[in-house]
Image (cartoon, rainbow, N blue to C red):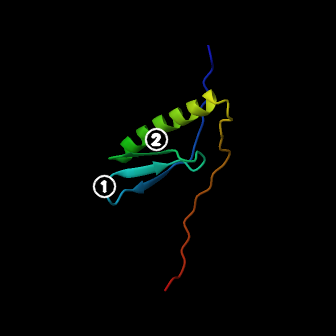
Amino acid sequence: MLKKKVLQYTVFYEVDSEDGGFVVSVPLLPGCYSQGETLEDAETNIKEAIGVYLLSLKKSREPIPTEDKSYQGVVQIAFA
């Protein structure tokens, strides 16, 4: 039996101002996006998208990216 490894990825949620709901992306996995009507839906959907993405990498024998540490911040600038 294969032992499953728990991986962790930073995701970013954005409000979809055109259609409503949320769009979510995974910066470490280029092109890995999903969406959902609620944050909970978006989280469920991005987990599925990440799983499919990683499975595709595994089948192609490409390395699985792992995230050591991630930092996020908000900056303010004066702009006229």
Taking the spot 56% from the left edge, 70% from the top edge, the residue there is 75
Q: For this view, does 79 lie left or right of residue 22? A: right
Q: For this view, does 78 lie left or right of residue 44? A: right
In the image, is residue 27 above or below residue 57? below
User: x%, y% of residue 56?
Assistant: 57, 32
Q: Quadrant of the N terminus?
A: top right
Which residue in the rendered view is the most extreme toward the top? 1
How many numbered discs sit on the rendered protein? Answer: 2
Taking the spot 67% from the left edge, 34% from the top edge, the residue there is 62
Q: CA distance from mark 1 to mark 2?
A: 18 Å
User: x%, y% of residue 21?
Assistant: 33, 51
Q: Amino acid at mark 2?
A: Ile
Of callouts 1 and 2, which one flags the residue occurring earlier in the amino acid sequence? Answer: 1
Q: Which residue position is annotated with label 1?
A: 19
Q: Which residue position is annotated with label 2?
A: 46
Q: Tell me if mark 2 has few (under 14), some (14-19) or many (20+) residues whose alpha carbon lies within 10 angstroms of its own.
A: many
Q: For this view, does 42 lie left or right of residue 6? A: left
SS label for mark 2: helix
Of residue 14 and residue 70, the one placed in the foreground of this image is 14
